[in-house]
Image (spheres, helix red, strand yellow):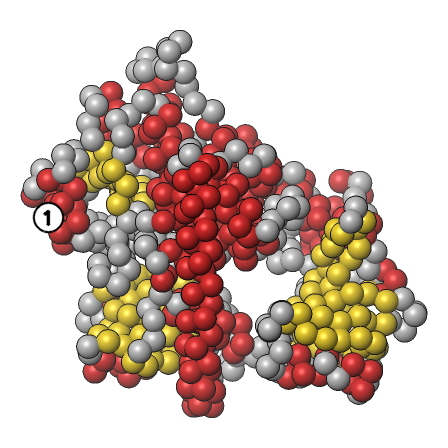
């Protein structure tokens, strides 16, 4: 195994790894920059294998941070909730509502971050003896994203005295003004980028308020919701609320929800997020939440859960309710204590997820045709729009196009002269800020988001104006340097070196995700000795290295592209360099290693 660095990734024109300047997927292979002295120092101090030290150093870890990175502890990394602006005011208002028996409504969002946030606060309020909570999730098609005045006034008419918005609300100026005038108190729990002025509310807890000094802007809404629950719990304890018949709840029991929402919102898995996910995966493995247990069973998850299972198996199923089904299904599933109800909801979501995949495939096919033409005209941005696209899948399609073109993407579904758009970012560009700037400039009426994702509404006659506006901001961000699709590698391996012991060693760096890239390795000069289809879209194969060792591999969603077609040629493909991740594959009590192939290059 070779994990030594070549030259720093920041070099203006680095030498391509193994000379691969353009792979089969059009990527420039590059080795991650590594401070070799720091890598050695980390491995010596922490007494970990040198490859682990190199991987830590390549991810920006130092002697001061590496230990907490490997063993993230909440007691070390969880911030004091009171450091956040309005947190104490929020805790006092929610605590008073609990004590006074006021009816509380939770206004959620229809994605996983919103569903987990709503479920966590619903479970917490139930555990501390609050009256039954009213859960409200707006219909994506009819109401759109975030609080709206009719919904808030409806909750008021039903008797709600306090509404807690989760994963939304920080830019809902008019709806929150209407709630205030109607005498309805609102506490906003959000993480999306805020504006200089804030809406009227009893409290606005958001690490991305412009006047916030506590840091932790990388947290998902579920992480913020957890801190709110911790703050309210502390307030109730100070007020003497708990007693022998009403004991204080164990806050750690809900970390499975925190892990799920954090991973699925693709926020950086660093700092407190890393600790929340690491500990949450341990709670999830116990399968105490009936909804998560039912969802795991319908998804066929039998092994110990990882961030991969959250992001690619559980998350899409919860999202399916908001995309093509009923928006509140995910929050209801995660909130219930009735396993029979949970199983029925999970099966309904499973059906919606299958429907979502079919719809997504059709929209993606059409979007790819438009994107190919767009890519030739705009080197910085993919911006596609069409009538008839289902608004519930445009976010997924934007993510797929972002993976394909390695640049920011916006996908817009047009209907009756109005476009509902979803964007995904790349190249370190803050897409949420760009959308907010477009709204402030009068190009769009609604929009917001965070660094890696955004949503907006745009009039059909302003599509080109919005496209030019975002494109110009990306050009300024890149400072005239053309973007290049890059595949970063952690080193090279021989096929024989891809052994279970090595894969287990890599697991010390998990959980992986945004901000903590899963280690990626290249196998040199291998041949495909077997290849066939796995399902409808995937290619599975067996690779043989120059050392004679063989390794199972799979390339997801590649049947219809050049990578998959090359692998399916088998031995006729000739010698190849193959890049991807190593994963342990457990089968009938035995552990083997399988490579998930991300890219291939022909051996010159």
Would you call the spot at circle 1 few (<14 residues within 10 Å), some (14-19), or many (20 or more)?
some
Q: Residue at x 70, y 62 (%)?
A: 581
Q: Is residue 567 visible?
A: yes
Position of the N terminus, as image quadrant, is bottom right
Residue 201, given in percent of the width and then of the height, sits at 19, 42
Q: Report whether 583 appears left or right of 246.
A: right
Residue 599, given in percent of the width and then of the height, sits at 67, 74
Quarter residue 601 falls in? bottom right
SS at mark 1 in the image: helix
Residue under label 1 = 178
Residue 426, given in percent of the width and then of the height, sits at 48, 69
Q: Is residue 521 visible?
A: no
Q: Residue at x 39, y 67 (%)?
A: 393
Q: Examine the rendered structure and indicate whether residue 225 appears above or below residue 311.
A: above
Residue 116, given in percent of the width and then of the height, sits at 41, 44
Q: Report whether 283 appears left or right of 588.
A: left
């Amino acid at each position: 195994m070779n994990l030594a660095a070549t030259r720093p990734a920041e070099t203006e024109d680095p030498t391509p790894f193994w000379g691969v300047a353009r792979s089969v997927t059009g990527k420039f292979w590059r080795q991650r920059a590594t401070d070799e002295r720091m890598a050695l120092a980390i491995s010596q101090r922490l007494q970990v294998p040198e490859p682990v030290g190199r991987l830590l150093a390549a991810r920006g870890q130092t002697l001061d941070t590496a230990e907490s990175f490997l063993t993230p502890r909440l007691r070390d990394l969880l911030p004091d909730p009171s450091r956040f602006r309005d947190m104490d005011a929020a805790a006092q208002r929610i605590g008073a509502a609990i004590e006074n028996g006021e009816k509380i409504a939770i206004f959620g969002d229809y994605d996983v971050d919103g569903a987990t946030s709503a479920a966590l606060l619903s479970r917490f309020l139930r555990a501390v003896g609050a009256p039954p909570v009213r859960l409200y999730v707006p219909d994506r098609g009819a109401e759109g994203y975030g609080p709206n005045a009719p919904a808030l006034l409806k909750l008021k008419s039903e008797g709600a005295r306090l509404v807690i918005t989760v994963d939304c609300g920080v830019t809902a100026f008019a709806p929150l003004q209407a709630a205030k005038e109607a005498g309805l108190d609102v506490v906003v729990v959000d993480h999306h980028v805020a504006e200089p002025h804030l809406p009227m509310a009893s409290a606005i807890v958001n690490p991305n308020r412009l006047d916030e000094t506590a840091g932790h802007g990388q947290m998902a809404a579920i992480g913020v919701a957890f801190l709110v629950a911790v703050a309210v719990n502390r307030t109730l304890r100070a007020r003497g609320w708990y007693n022998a018949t009403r004991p204080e709840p164990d806050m750690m029991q809900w970390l499975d929800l925190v892990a799920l929402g954090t991973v699925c919102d693709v926020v950086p898995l660093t700092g407190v997020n890393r600790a929340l996910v690491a500990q949450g995966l341990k709670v999830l493995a116990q399968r105490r939440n009936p909804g998560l247990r039912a969802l795991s069973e319908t998804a066929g998850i039998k092994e110990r859960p990882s961030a991969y299972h959250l992001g690619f198996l559980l998350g899409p199923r919860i999202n399916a309710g908001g995309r093509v089904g009923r928006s509140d299904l995910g929050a209801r599933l995660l909130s219930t204590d009735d396993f029979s109800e949970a199983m029925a909801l999970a099966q309904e979501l499973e059906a919606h997820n299958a429907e979502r995949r079919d719809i997504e495939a059709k929209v993606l096919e059409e979007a790819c045709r438009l994107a190919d033409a767009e890519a030739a005209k705009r080197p910085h941005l993919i911006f596609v729009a069409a009538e008839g696209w289902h608004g519930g899948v445009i976010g997924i399609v934007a993510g797929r196009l972002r993976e394909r073109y390695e640049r920011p993407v916006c996908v817009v579904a047009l209907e009756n002269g109005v476009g509902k758009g979803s964007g995904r970012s790349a190249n370190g560009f803050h897409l949420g800020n760009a959308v907010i700037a477009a709204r402030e400039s009068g190009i769009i009426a609604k929009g917001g988001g965070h660094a890696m994702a955004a949503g907006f509404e745009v009039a059909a006659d302003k599509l080109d104006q919005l496209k030019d506006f975002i494109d110009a901001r990306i050009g300024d961000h890149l400072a005239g340097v053309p973007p290049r699709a890059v595949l970063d590698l952690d080193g090279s391996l021989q096929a024989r070196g891809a052994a279970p012991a090595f894969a287990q060693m890599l697991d010390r760096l998990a959980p992986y995700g945004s901000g903590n890239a899963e280690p990626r390795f290249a196998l040199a000069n291998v041949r495909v000795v077997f290849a066939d289809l796995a399902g409808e879209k995937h290619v599975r194969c067996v690779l043989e290295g120059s050392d004679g060792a063989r390794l199972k591999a799979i390339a997801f969603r590649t049947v219809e592209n050049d990578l998959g077609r090359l692998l399916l040629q088998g031995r006729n493909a000739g010698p190849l360099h193959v890049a991807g991740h190593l994963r342990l594959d457990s089968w009938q009590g035995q552990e083997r290693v399988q490579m998930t192939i991300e890219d291939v290059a022909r051996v010159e």
